[in-house]
Image (spheres, rainbow, N blue to C red):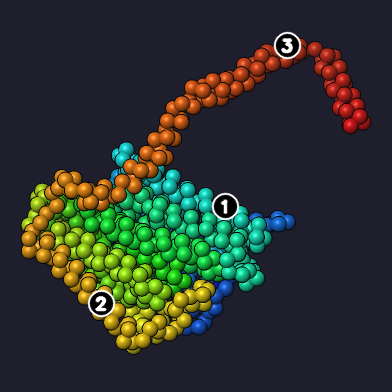
Amino acid sequence: MLANSWLVLLFPLLGFLITGIGYKRLSASFCGVFASLMVFASFLYSLILFIGFKNGDSVASIVNFADWINSEKLNISFGFMIDPLSLTMMMIITGVGFLIHVFSIGYMHNDLRVNTYFSQLNLFTFSMLLLVMSSNYLLMFVGWEGVGLCSYLLIGFWYREKAFNNAARKAFIINRIGDLGFIIGLIAMFTCFHSLDFTSVFTQTLKFESGNTIITFITLMLFLGAIGKSAQIPLFTWLPDAMAGPTPVSALIHAATMVTAGVYLIARSSALFILSPVTMNLILIVGIATTLLAAFIALMQNDIKKVLAYSTISQLGYMFVALGLSAFTSSVFHLTTHAFFKALLFLAAGSVIHAYKGEQDIRKMGGIRKTLPLTYIVFFTGVLAISGIPPFSGFFSKDEILSAAYQSNIFIWLLLVIGAMLTCFYMFRLLFLVFHGSNRGDTLDIPKQKKVMTIPLVMLAILSFAGGFLNIPELFGGNFNFTNFLKSSVYGNFFKNEQLHSDQTEIILLLTVLSLSCITIYFAYHKYIIKHIIPEPDSVQRKLIPNVIYRKFYVDELYYSIIIKPYNWIADKMLPAIEKHFIDFVVNSIGVVTMAVGNRLRLIQTGNIGFYMFIMVAAIITFIAAIVWF
């Protein structure tokens, strides 16, 4: 069964090739259905592998298909690591990805380039699967770069808009910073371990002591790569701008694929990271800072997709906090539940935007709870899940992270609780402003909702509700099924199949967080439902702190001032001095010299055979003399 694991990759690759090559000849409906079926086939085979693991029919193993690079010092195979961690990611990517593909059939049916869209969507899925299935870091990096390329293409899919092109370019360039760190980490890793295979590297880590300098350097560089892909401070500014792409693309990037790559990289490399307390503490600090910064920014955003974008950044911060606390399975569990409810929220937001003819400003919405009842129900489900309200999925995954934080340091727990309260407020603010009150926008265009769009929403809503039951803690009669499934794939996990605190302490923590969340929800209800407060366009500009938050703490402006502006100034100054007077001079001089030499050499082409024979013999004698001499 494992020997055919390449089929998981083959199906979306075929979808990309067929829809890509025949995009001018194939119908839009065929490309949408075919691309979706390819991802569904990949999901089915991933499910078969998953069931085999759960039933004990298979064990974690490396499946090598061919030698890729074979030299004296570097041997890299084209192979896959099939274990609980990779299987979990494969199920998320193909399962949630399939639902997004199906939703896209209805959402993008009028687009002129819909065939190209589905081709790129399949390539995105293939690249992400290659990333999580690889058995070595170099092959993982190929998938890593493939995801970056596809994100660039899909974010700038509507390329006629300059702003969308700028957003795609911004995502591509910022991710190159993280990728540079990844490359440096791989070079250092090969220098240290003489291998890039997971099994070889992880086995050799047993020889190193905690705090080793080279291990710290390697993990810091890998962490830089993770920061870029998973949009953590300071490389997070690309993700909100990535909303320029079609809404299903936003769902795919934010939920099932690209942004989870950094979390996966650290979880996969846990054997390395637990040997570096410095890196682990840095991951923890960056995760906390990102959680709070993004949550504060989301409070003041009025674009429905921007609110969800900063929500993604904040939730990724939670995952990084769990990683920094060595609670690797808790991080992956929250990644899983987040894939369900964040995909749901983005696709439901897409339905709202579709109804408002492309409008995304929540100040121009409202009162569509009865107009779009199904969209309201599923969106409400997603809001409850991300807010951590029991028994929805986010409750269980957030509780694990909060428990690990409390066990480590109560101050960290308090900061994460503040982040949870902010999440409740901005998500219910979004719900109330979009669906409650009266309509403040133009006349709605409510087409009959197609089943191809509603079925994925319902499926994701079910997963957002029931997904948390994958890992029920002992307090509620469970036995950490998800943790036990994953524990063989990570090293030094915080949870060791046991309760972190007593049941009484756990109950007190749960009630405390739940009570604070309910109070926060009521505060949002009082402000936006009872008092009917609607954010005014210029209201925040009159107040210092709200204006700073609304302007996203001026991070983009800061980057422009200290990086982009000086770079442009240097480029302008260097243009005449270097480009024109040096580079152009050198290039033009080579052309002039070549022409001059050619004009001289062509004179020897006389057509005299005797002269040619003389030149040939002279050349041979010169060549032999040179060999003898040297």
- Of discs 1 and 2, which sits in the foreground? 2
Would you name the residue on which mark 3 appears? 603
Q: Earlier in the sequence, mark 1 or mark 2?
A: 1
Label 1 vs label 2: CA separation? 44 Å
Which label was assigned to residue 547?
Answer: none
Residue type marked 1: Ile
Above or below — where is 319 with respect to 150? Answer: below
Q: Quadrant of the C terminus?
A: top right
Residue type marked 3: Leu
Above or below — where is 219 with respect to 4? Answer: above
Above or below — where is 152 with respect to 624? Answer: below
Q: Residue at the location (36% across, 49% down)?
A: 237
In front of the other: 204 or 380: 204
Q: Earlier in the sequence, mark 2 or mark 3?
A: 2
Would you name the residue on which mark 2 appears? 512
Residue 373: percent from left, percent from top: 14, 65
291 with respect to 607 (left or right): left
Residue 563: percent from left, percent from top: 42, 40
In front of the other: 124 or 33: 124
Q: Is mark 2 in CB contact (under 8 Å) with mark 3?
A: no
* Crowd rating for badge 3 (residues with CA inside 10 Å; few <14, some 14–19, many 20+): few
User: Is disc 3 placed on a helix, strand or loop?
Assistant: helix
Label 1 vs label 3: CA separation? 54 Å
Residue type marked 2: Thr
Would you name the residue on which mark 1 appears? 184
